[in-house]
Image (spheres, helix red, strand yellow):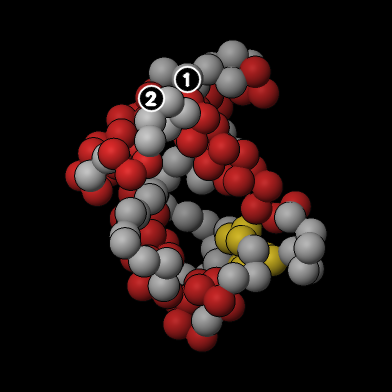
């Protein structure tokens, strides 16, 4: 998520949460958008973000890794809020065990398109993330 306009830049859905997941997501973000040096990557202190592979990848791409101290969620609060919205808006009335992996991927894809292109946000002057990014550019 780009914190400037809250746009979801890249995401991956794997059946595991291991280091390749976050590295592949970071690589997708680099394909989708050009970044200046010194962009800050906010995350928690999970093992995938503290791994040598992830940290080396971030340094190689001139990113700065930022992790709040333990028990302090400020660095990744925005993406945690997004995850909460995704769950409540897209999956609230669905029993998770009744969906196939394909259906989950489909629903997440649809929600992210909706979130980026149709869902207005008060903090973006009632524009969508895509609209706000274009207005500011």
Can see residue 130?
no
Q: Which residue is mark 2?
A: 114
- Return the x and y of residue 87 as percentages of the image width and height: 49, 36
Closest to the observer, 113 or 61: 113
Category of crowding for the residue at label 2, using alpha-carbon neighbours closer than 10 angstroms: few (below 14), some (14–19), many (at least 20): few
Residue at x-position 46% and y-position 70%: 61
**Element type at mark 2:** helix
* Residue found at x 52% / y 57%: 36
Residue depicted at 67% across the width and 23% down the height: 123
Q: Residues within 10 Å of mark 1 (few under 14, many from 20)?
A: some
Foreground: 7 or 74?
Answer: 74
Disc number for residue 119: 1
Name above or below for residue 59 compared with residue 32.
Answer: below
Q: Is residue 62 left or right of residue 64?
A: left
In the figure, is residue 1 to the left or right of 111? right
Q: Secondary structure at mark 1?
A: loop
Instruction: List the single residue furthest toward the top.
Output: 126
Left or right of 105? Residue 114 is right
Q: Counting residues from the N terminus, which is met first, the one under dot 2 or under dot 1?
A: 2
The residue at 33%/44% (across/down) is 97
Mark 1 and mark 2 in contact (Cβ < 8 Å)?
Answer: yes
List x then y, in percent, for residue 12. Answer: 34, 54
């Amino acid at each position: 998520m780009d914190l400037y306009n809250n746009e979801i830049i890249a995401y991956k859905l794997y059946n595991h949460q291991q280091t390749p997941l976050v590295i592949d997501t970071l690589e997708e973000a680099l394909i989708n958008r050009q970044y200046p040096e010194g962009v800050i990557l906010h995350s928690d202190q999970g093992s995938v973000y503290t791994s040598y592979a992830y940290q080396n990848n971030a340094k190689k791409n001139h990113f700065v890794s930022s992790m709040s101290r333990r028990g302090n969620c400020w660095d990744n609060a925005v993406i945690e809020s997004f995850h909460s919205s995704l769950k409540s808006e897209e999956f609230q009335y669905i029993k998770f065990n009744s969906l196939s992996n394909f259906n989950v991927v489909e629903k997440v894809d649809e929600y992210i398109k909706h979130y980026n292109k149709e869902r207005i946000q008060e903090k973006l002057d009632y524009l969508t993330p895509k609209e706000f990014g274009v207005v500011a550019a």
